Image (cartoon, helix red, strand yellow):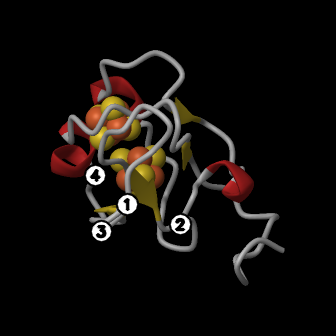
Amino acid sequence: MAGGVPMDLYAYTIVSDVCEGIGDCIAVCPVECISWAEGKTNAKGTAFAFIDGETCISCRGCLNACPIEGAILDEWHPELQLV
Ligand code: SF4
Ligand code: SF4
């Protein structure tokens, strides 16, 4: 468990330290399960977003929209979301 989040969800992940805080993913998510990590910055010094894995429906919309290779994974890895 990471922060009380279940590890076995069928959901996508935003890799906090790869995300560049562009936000295209937030705009396209049909279930509004992507949020900014308020007040936090990643290893690149940018804002980053994270996915609520319990709400994500694995539709791939965010992955298609994100311009940063490797920022979004089509698997659930909560240990890579630094929230
Ligand atoms: S995951 Fe991609 S689209 Fe979403 S905020 Fe990060 S860099 Fe931007
Ligand atoms: S896969 Fe779909 S539901 Fe899940 S975070 Fe991305 S856009 Fe939202």
**For this view, does 54 lie left or right of residue 42?**
right
Residue 62 picture quarter? top left
Checking the image for residue 17, the label placed there is none
Give the foreground label among 2 and 1: 1
Name the residue beneath numbered marker 3.
38
The answer to whether the residues at label 2 and label 1 have Cβ atoms under 8 Å apart is yes
Q: Distance between the residues labelled 4 and 3?
A: 18 Å
The answer to whether the residues at label 1 and label 3 have Cβ atoms under 8 Å apart is yes
Q: What residue type is labelled 1?
A: Lys
Pointer 4 residue Cβ closer than 8 Å to ligand 2: yes
Residue 55: image x %, image y %?
Answer: 48, 71
Label located before the other in sequence (2 or 1): 1
Checking the image for residue 29, the label placed there is 4
Name the residue beneath numbered marker 2.
83
Label located before the other in sequence (4 or 2): 4
Name the residue beneath numbered marker 1.
40
Label located before the other in sequence (4 or 3): 4
Label located before the other in sequence (1 or 4): 4
Query: Residue at (45%, 44%) from the top-left corner?
Result: 42
Q: How crowded is mark 2: few (under 14 residues within 10 Å), some or many (20 or more)?
A: some
Residue 32: image x %, image y %?
Answer: 27, 65
